[in-house]
Amino acid sequence: MLHLIDTFRRPEGGIAMTEPFHIAYQLHDAGWASVTVKYGGESHQQAVSYLHDSLKDLCDLAIALQSGGSITEAKVLFLDEPGELALLVSAAEQSNEAEVRLIYSDDWFFSFNFNRSPQQTLWHGKVGRYELAENIRLILEDIYLNIGEKEYLERWVEHPFPKEGYLKLSRL
């Protein structure tokens, strides 16, 4: 497991009690990736299809977390064919914590509103807002430096690497 170092600027405030939470994202060939989410003492791994731009969702979430503003509900969707893992995140303005729900569905409930099977909440808890943003920044940095924009697009087919968001996040 990656040990995160909080390199982002953190607003003044006390230390929040948060639970261990980590996301790993690995790009494969021909429009496939995998995501592993570790939470508490458990983990969930899933294939991720090019049908949705999950990396951009992650990037947008990290920028929102790092901004320190209020997040009503940010969604990061990881689509399999079929199946869907949803990361739902909310945070109060200037809070050091974010509330996270990790939900799995056998269908594409959040993406296409399919509702043939029940959603299963895998985990719900509070995580360090800036630690989660740094976790995501490191995912983006790894892909940008080790795979690059051109190869990313060749592998991911439909969606380019979210370079503007990554560069913005790197400057925060």
Image (cartoon, rainbow, N blue to C red):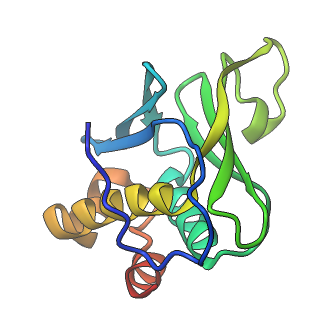
Task: Specify the quadrant of the image occupied by residue 163.
Answer: bottom left
Q: Residue furthest front?
A: 14
Report the number of discs. 0
User: In this orientation, which residue lies closer to the viewer: 43 or 58?
Assistant: 43
User: In this orientation, which residue lies closer to the viewer: 7 or 56?
Assistant: 7
Q: Residue furthest left?
A: 146
Residue 80 seen by the camera: yes
Q: Position of residue 137 (x, y in %)?
A: 38, 65
Q: Position of residue 158 (x, y in %)?
A: 46, 57
Residue 102 seen by the camera: no
Q: Is residue 18 above or below residue 108?
A: below
Q: Residue at x 44, y 25 (%)?
A: 46
Pick the quarter of the image with the N terminus: top left
82 displayed left or right of 167: right
118 displayed left or right of 168: right
156 displayed left or right of 116: left
Q: Residue at x 18, y 61 (%)?
A: 147
Q: Residue at x 26, y 44 (%)?
A: 2
Q: Is residue 30 above or below residue 121?
A: below
